[in-house]
Amino acid sequence: MALVLYDDTVLSGLKRFHNSSATYNFANHTIQIKQNWKELGVAAVVWDAAIVLCMYLEAGGINLEGRSVIELGAGTGLVGIVATLLGAEATVTDREIALEFLKTNVHDNLPTDLLHKVSVKPLTWGKGLEDFSPFDVIVGADIIYLEETFQDLLKTILHLSTENTVILLSCKLRYQRDHQFLDMMRQHFSVVQVLYDQKVDVYIYKALKIHQTKEL
């Protein structure tokens, strides 16, 4: 049994995941995200990596105006919502089990005149990829954490990208295996760290496909 020291900041941080909603302000909009930890767990709460990625996008880390963007493992959909508000044509994806919850958050937080610019679709990494074409931008927040998904995640990113696609991965590097995924990425992509938020220990990596990469 691992010994976990008592820490007020950790406990207060976990408590926010059990709140039924969380409110954010991005792109001159108030966004109220529904959360459902009890039924959907990690897929239905807003993680720090998503918030940091939204801040990066809002600050102009990359121009999204008129660009096609896909969010992988979207969870609550916060990043996809912000991308749409910033001018992207967004496709927001997650597993089928989380889709209705995801749709609710996306549709409840976008103005009616922007709903045509976003679509919510099921995507299990490594499967059904023939239904998707490459995108201008791929974003993912805290999707690097299960080692058994790494091969399928990499296969998915490779399928969805061209040499012109920008990939932004926002994550906490909790374990050595997380670094191993970045090493896997480096076999096919040029990967650089573009931001580190020390306060919440979140990194953002930008990746571009290397010329003539081999598909998995």
Image: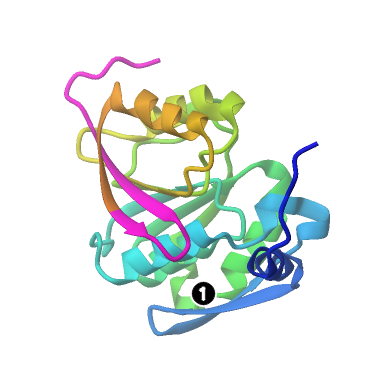
Q: Is residue 171 visible?
A: yes
Residue 183 or residue 5, whichever sits in front: 5
Looking at this rendering, what residue extends furthest in the left direction? 211
Q: Which residue is mark 1?
A: 110
Count of numbered labels shown in the rendering: 1
Residue 118 or residue 34, whichever sits in front: 34
Q: Is residue 153 above or below residue 203?
A: above
Q: Quadrant of the C terminus?
A: top left
x and y, in percent, of residue 86 in the image? 34, 70
Give the magenta-colored segment's residue range: 195-216
Judged from the image, the secondary structure of the residue bearing numbered disc 1 is: loop
Q: Is residue 200 magenta?
A: yes
x and y, in percent, of residue 14 in the image? 70, 63
Residue 59 or residue 102, whichever sits in front: 59
Residue sitting at x 25%, y 62%? 61
Residue 147 located left or right of residue 37 = left
Q: Quadrant of the N terminus?
A: top right
How many neighbours does mark 1 have within 10 angstroms: few (below 14), some (14-19), or many (20 or more)? some
x and y, in percent, of residue 42 in the image? 68, 51
x and y, in percent, of residue 87 in the image? 32, 68
Residue 43 or residue 14, whichever sits in front: 14
Q: Is residue 194 above or below residue 143?
A: below
Residue sitting at x 34%, y 56%? 196
Residue 106 located left or right of residue 6 = left
Q: Is residue 166 visible?
A: no
Q: Is residue 206 above or below residue 182?
A: below
* Image color mode: rainbow
Q: Quadrant of residue 138?
A: top left
Residue sitting at x 28%, y 71%? 59
Q: Is residue 65 magenta?
A: no
**Residue type pointed to by label 1:** Leu
